[in-house]
Image: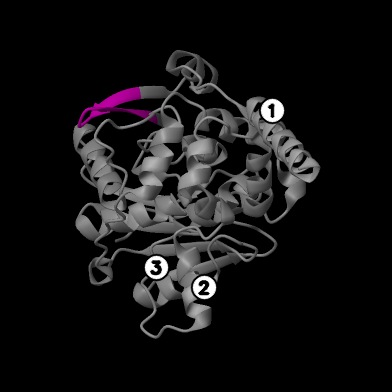
């Protein structure tokens, strides 16, 4: 019986160590007031849309451009883009429900279709009839949904390392793997979809997971700033966002993208080191959207607008008809965007 007592002590020691480890990782939610005070901008507004107070940031004047972030992200991902674009366009970035400062939706409207409707209703509330759309990752799928639903309102489409590409007709081991990656094939999605781990992570959210996540998302890890990791981590701790994330990942995945309706000018931008959504999806989108153009950034990962903001926004501005000055003594050359 001595060996049984030894086994019991070992198991008890492992259990107590696990409990102690989880206590170290325990994180309370950050209150709405505190997180807003820290991460809102002077240009921030909270606009009620269908019962949800959307955090929206406006910068600049001119034709409107909606900027839509990806999963686990927030409108802060567009910070550099908004500053660079504001001399030429009115940029509108949005924290989707369950993300950033917007926080959770009591009705759990977290599908691609739901998010598309939020963007359209926001545009309606702002009396914006026609606009450009840019979306990264999941935000690209939302942009596709909006453009498919109301192609008459969308002037142009910019898809950046976007999910939402059409599924391949022929399935193979390779295409099946890529299909899984299309919606975000990183290990973090699989981890959160596990019922046991998701319940633990709801209260014990380790910051090192976000550091690991950022190393996957960036092609050049030296460009990761500590403040960026802190921002992603703390915005996830915003009161209600962790539960909203689990609800979103376990909820319905409805989308109804009709690629035949996407006749607007379309730019597809991709980092060739994207480990979340493979570059093959860029060419799937190019094939599905006639007349679209693909730009590939070498050595760049999943979020070009964060990793190489100046280079990526210059390509987008050129697509929109703005010639960036090479000689700062000359003024910028602007061209009216043609549909």
* Front: mark 2 or 1: 1
| Part of the protein shown in magenta | 46-56
Q: Quadrant of residue 255?
A: bottom left
Q: Circles 2 and 1: CB distance less than 8 Å?
A: no
Q: Earlier in the sequence, mark 3 or mark 2?
A: 3
Q: Position of residue 315 (x, y in %)?
A: 54, 57
Q: Position of residue 51 (x, y in %)?
A: 22, 28
* Front: mark 3 or 2: 2
Q: Which mark is residue 20?
A: 1
Residue occupying the point 36% across, 39% down = 62
Question: Magenta span: helix, strand or loop, mainly?
Answer: strand
Q: Which mark is residue 165?
A: 3
Q: Which residue is mark 2?
A: 177
All told, the count of numbered labels is: 3
Residue occupying the point 47% across, 16% down = 31
* Distance between the alpha carbons at the discs numbered 3 and 1: 44 Å
Q: Quadrant of residue 69?
A: top left
Query: Is residue 93 something that shows in the picture?
Result: no
Q: Earlier in the sequence, mark 2 or mark 1?
A: 1
* Distance between the alpha carbons at the discs numbered 2 and 1: 37 Å
| In front of the other: 239 or 190 | 190
Residue occupying the point 63% across, 57% down = 301
By what rule are the colours in the image chosen? one colour
Q: Is residue 195 above or below residue 276?
A: above
Q: Is residue 256 above or below residue 328?
A: below
Query: Mark 1 falls on what kind of element?
Result: helix
| In front of the other: 237 or 114 | 237
């Amino acid at each position: 019986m001595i060996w049984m007592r030894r086994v019991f002590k070992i198991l008890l020691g492992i259990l107590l160590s696990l409990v102690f480890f989880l206590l170290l990782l325990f994180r309370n939610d950050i209150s709405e007031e505190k997180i807003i005070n820290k991460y809102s901008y002077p240009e921030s507004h909270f606009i009620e849309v269908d019962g949800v107070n959307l955090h929206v940031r406006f910068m600049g004047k001119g034709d409107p451009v909606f900027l839509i972030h990806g999963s686990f992200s927030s409108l802060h991902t567009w910070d550099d883009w908004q500053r660079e674009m504001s001399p030429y366009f009115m940029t509108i970035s949005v924290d989707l429900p369950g993300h950033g400062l917007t926080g959770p939706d009591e009705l759990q409207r977290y599908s691609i279709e739901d998010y598309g409707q939020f963007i359209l209703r926001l545009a309606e509330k702002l009396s914006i009839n026609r606009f450009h759309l840019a979306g990264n990752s999941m935000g690209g799928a939302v942009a596709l949904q909006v453009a498919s639903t109301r192609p008459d309102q969308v002037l142009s489409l910019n898809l950046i390392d976007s999910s939402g590409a059409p599924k391949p007709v022929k399935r193979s081991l390779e295409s099946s793997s890529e299909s899984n990656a299309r919606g975000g094939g990183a290990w973090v999605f699989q981890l959160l979809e596990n019922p046991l781990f998701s319940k633990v992570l709801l209260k014990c959210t380790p910051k090192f997971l976000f550091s690991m996540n950022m190393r996957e998302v960036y092609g050049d890890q030296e460009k990761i700033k500590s403040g960026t990791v802190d921002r992603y981590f703390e915005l996830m701790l915003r009161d209600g966002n962790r539960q909203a994330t689990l609800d979103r990942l376990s909820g319905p995945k409805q989308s109804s993208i009709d690629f035949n309706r996407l006749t607007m000018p379309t730019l597809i931008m991709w980092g060739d080191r994207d480990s979340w959504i493979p570059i093959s999806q860029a060419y799937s989108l190019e094939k599905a959207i006639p007349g679209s153009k693909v730009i590939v950034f070498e050595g760049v990962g999943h979020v070009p607008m964060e990793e190489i903001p100046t280079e990526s926004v210059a390509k987008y501005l050129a697509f929109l008809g703005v010639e960036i000055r090479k000689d700062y003594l000359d003024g910028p050359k602007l061209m009216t965007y043609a549909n």
